[in-house]
Image (cartoon, rainbow, N blue to C red):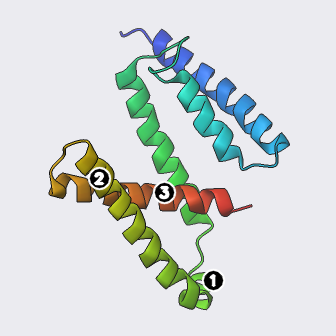
């Protein structure tokens, strides 16, 4: 039987920091997701203080992304998208193009190959779309 102490500590501290961060963000009239992101930065390995198991945190983060996308999907309406198609489609194309280009430029600055930069930029554009959708929903 394995020790579940690090898992419980990581989840408990993450939930407490996310709650506090979300509460502060809402009080500042921002989306709670901003507070959740700050909580993740505070718990990350590049800040002083508690740092959980990086491998375990990555696995938990995957579950968080799944839940975030599930939440976006729960609010998705094909009818609303169809009604907004004249704004949504060009806006999505522009957002994906700009995010992909910025990701490719950043990757080139880091010395990556163009193909790696494009994949990074596309991943960035998809992730930023989900976060923007979640931030804009009430």
Marker disc for residue 80? 1
Local secondary structure at mark 2: helix
Q: Is residue 135 above or below residue 59?
A: below
Q: In the displayed structure, does residue 55 sit left or right of residue 11?
A: left
Q: Is residue 85 above or below residue 14?
A: below
Check disc 2: other Cα within 10 Å, few if <14, some if 14-19, many if 20+: many
Q: Is residue 63 above or below residue 101?
A: above
- Lower sequence index among marks 3 and 1: 1
Q: Which residue is mark 3?
A: 128
Count numbered badges in the picture: 3
- Lower sequence index among marks 3 and 2: 2
Residue in the picture at 43% in, 27% down: 57
- Lower sequence index among marks 1 and 2: 1
Question: Are dots 3 and 1 in contact, CB under 8 Å?
Answer: no
Q: Quadrant of residue 49?
A: top right
Q: Which residue is mark 2?
A: 120
Quadrant position of the N terminus in the picture: top left
Q: In the displayed structure, does residue 106 sit left or right of residue 20?
A: left
Check disc 1: other Cα within 10 Å, few if <14, some if 14-19, many if 20+: few
Marker disc for residue 94? none
Q: CA distance from mark 3 to mark 2?
A: 12 Å
Residue in the picture at 54% in, 64% down: 73
Q: CA distance from mark 1 to mark 2?
A: 30 Å
Nearer to us of marks 3 and 1 is 3
Q: CA distance from mark 3 to mark 1?
A: 21 Å
Local secondary structure at mark 1: helix
Q: Report x, y in % for residue 9.
A: 55, 15
Q: Report x, y in % for residue 92.
A: 47, 75
């Amino acid at each position: 039987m394995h020790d579940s102490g690090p898992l419980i500590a990581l989840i408990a501290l993450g939930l407490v920091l996310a709650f506090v961060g979300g509460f502060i963000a809402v009080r500042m009239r921002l989306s709670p997701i901003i507070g959740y992101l700050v909580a993740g930065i505070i718990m990350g390995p590049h800040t002083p203080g508690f740092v959980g198991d990086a491998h375990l945190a990555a696995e938990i983060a995957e579950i968080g992304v799944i839940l975030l996308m599930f939440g976006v999907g729960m609010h998705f309406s094909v009818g609303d998208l169809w009604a907004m198609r004249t704004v949504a489609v060009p806006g999505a194309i522009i957002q994906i193009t700009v995010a992909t280009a910025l990701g490719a430029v950043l990757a080139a600055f880091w010395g990556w190959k163009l193909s790696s930069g494009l994949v990074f930029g596309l991943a960035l554009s998809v992730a930023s779309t989900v976060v923007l959708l979640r931030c804009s929903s009430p």
